[in-house]
Amino acid sequence: MTESPCQSCGACCSYSSNWPRFTIEEDAALDLIPAKFVNDRLSGMRCDGDRCTALTGKIGISTACGIYEIRPDVCRTCMPGDPECLMARRRFGLGALPASFAAGDH
Ligand code: SF4
Ligand code: SF4
């Protein structure tokens, strides 16, 4: 299996404070996310500027989600190679990905 390009990216986790927003998660799932990573309105992830506070590492070099196993649904649906991914990567001057990555894990 090809290694996910996300591990050397992180662009979509740093694109907009409106992106890591909770949608259809059950309360029980959201309760697992440490409060320090949740915004004051409890509507999404807490961001520092545009960057999700759960993201560690350096964008375009090496990044990781600090709550990967319990990340919100919106983060699970963003797939490498999809339009949102490419938009985020462009912002950070990262190249496009082959469409085949759209089927990969995030
Ligand atoms: S989905 Fe795209 S923008 Fe997000 S981390 Fe992966 S490669 Fe980067
Ligand atoms: S919760 Fe994780 S996957 Fe979602 S935006 Fe934050 S760092 Fe990225």
Image: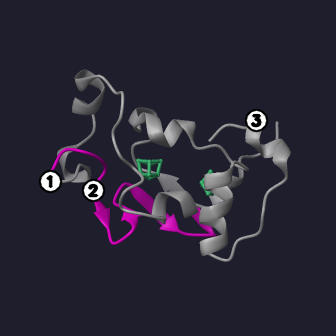
The residue under label 1 is 40
Q: Earlier in the sequence, mark 3 or mark 2?
A: 2
Query: Position of 106 compared to 66: left or right?
Result: right
Q: CA distance from mark 1 to mark 3?
A: 34 Å
Amino acid type for the residue under numbered disc 3: Ala
Q: Label 3's element? A: helix
Tag 2 residue: 46
Quarter of the figure with residue 55: bottom left
Q: Which residues are magenta?
A: 41-62
Q: Is residue 4 left or right of residue 74?
A: right
Residue 78 in picture, x, y percent from top left? 58, 43
Q: Amino acid at mark 1?
A: Asp
Q: What's the residue at 23%, 49% (across, down)? A: 38
User: First in sequence: mark 1 or mark 2?
Assistant: 1
Residue type pointed to by label 2 = Arg
Front residue (pair 73, 69): 73
Quadrant into which the N terminus falls: top right
Q: Residue at x 39, y 34 (%)?
A: 70
Q: Which residue: 23% across, 43% down?
A: 34
